[in-house]
Image (tube, grey):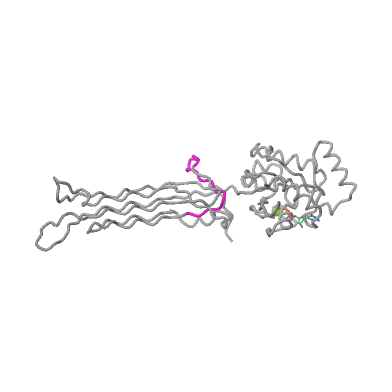
Amino acid sequence: MHKFIDEIFIRVKSGDGGPGAVSFRHEKYIEFGGPDGGNGGAGGNIYIQADSRIINLAHLKRNRLYKAGNGDSGKGRQRSGKNGQDLIINVPLGTVITSDDDVPICDLTDETPYLLVTGGMGGKGNAFFKSSTNQAPRHFQPGISTEEFTIKLSLKMIADVGLVGLPNSGKSTLLKTITHASPKIANYPFTTLSPNLGTLEVNNFKQCIIADIPGIIEGASMGHGLGLSFLKHIERVRVLIFVLDITMAHVDDELNMLRRELDSYNPVLNQRPSILVFNKIDLIEEAFLNEWIESFRAKGQYPIPISGRDNINLDKLIFEISKYID
Ligand SMILES: Nc1nc2c(ncn2[C@@H]2O[C@H](COP(=O)(O)OP(=O)(O)OP(=O)(O)O)[C@@H](O)[C@H]2O)c(=O)[nH]1
Ligand SMILES: [Mg+2]
């Protein structure tokens, strides 16, 4: 399996223009039959296009340089050289392109191809330079040469909902129960090493994309655990779901820690609408659960008690999610 790559630098070069031709018509008994050198072909363009079937940027590690075709030379009898072949670089939806020093270039949120760089123009052949004063020009233009440059591609997945929680809180289990995704699930922290997406149908078949990201621990902003870099994949979600493990001693500390870590990554995330869930309620006493629900309510928070594994109350959660999807 490919390693999950969500940031990569690549070199690109559009095609060089082909040179114009120097050629003269060959006719019997006529020494110079007139210039007929055609123009060079244009170099190929480079396009970047998102494709929903691609999930990360790993496939771009293959090449050192992504290059479009060069234009062909012009030919005799005023024939133009063939244009160089365009190159289309496919990337996942949500890929953001910048220059290597972070100047924004484009953000590929749909599958429309983006013209990154055009190929060089072809040169004029000598037929172009014929004039009343110069009937037999030997002059032609070389094509325009293009230059290599580096671009940075970063993936920010496009999801409507992001699952946030400590390792082992049951995020992947929840994703698996409510969508057709099949993420890895296991009873140890950091089972999920890269984001998973799943699709949920709400409100008459509207698709809602849910992102499950690796668990977050105290100090993630200082690089502990898998760090916070995966939070970029939920930067654009409409709603966050905090998946809190109710079997942990202090579910409120759990939430505060997550909020703090989100804050140190990007304070905007804490201003997003959010849904709180208490997960794994199948494992605890009802009285214990009610105490926690009461203590949250006293603070104006209304967690939804669920079991992602045993499918308890998930219809309630889905209804809550659907309010944000239209
Ligand atoms: N009893 C019970 N167990 C659950 C529930 N949800 C998840 N689990 C278990 O908790 C463990 C962790 O579940 P995961 O879904 O892998 O947790 P995660 O939050 O994705 O974990 P990371 O990927 O490590 O962050 C697994 O053994 C699950 O079977 C639940 O509602 N009830
Ligand atoms: Mg997981």
Quadrant position of residue 24: bottom left
Asked if residue 250 lies in the magenta stretch, the reply is no
Of 83 and 89, which appears nearest the observer? 83
Residue drawn 74% across the image and 45% down it: 242
Farthest front residue in view: 204
Farthest bottom residue in view: 28
Residue 177: x percent and y percent?
74, 57
Of 199 and 229, which appears nearest the observer? 199
Q: Please report the bounds of the magenta region as a residue range.
A: 89-104
Left or right of 70? Residue 181 is right
Of 47 and 97, which appears nearest the observer? 47
Q: Quadrant of ligand 2?
A: bottom right
Quadrant position of residue 236: top right
**Residue 219, placed above or below residue 5:** above
**Residue 75, placed above or below residue 150:** below
Residue 212: x percent and y percent?
68, 51
Left or right of 35? Residue 258 is right
Residue 95: x percent and y percent?
55, 48
Farthest right residue in view: 287
Count the labels in the image: 0
Quadrant position of residue 84: bottom left
Residue 271: x percent and y percent?
68, 37
Asked if residue 101 lies in the magenta stretch, the reply is yes
Of 68 and 27, which appears nearest the observer? 27
Name the quarter where the N terminus is drawn. bottom right
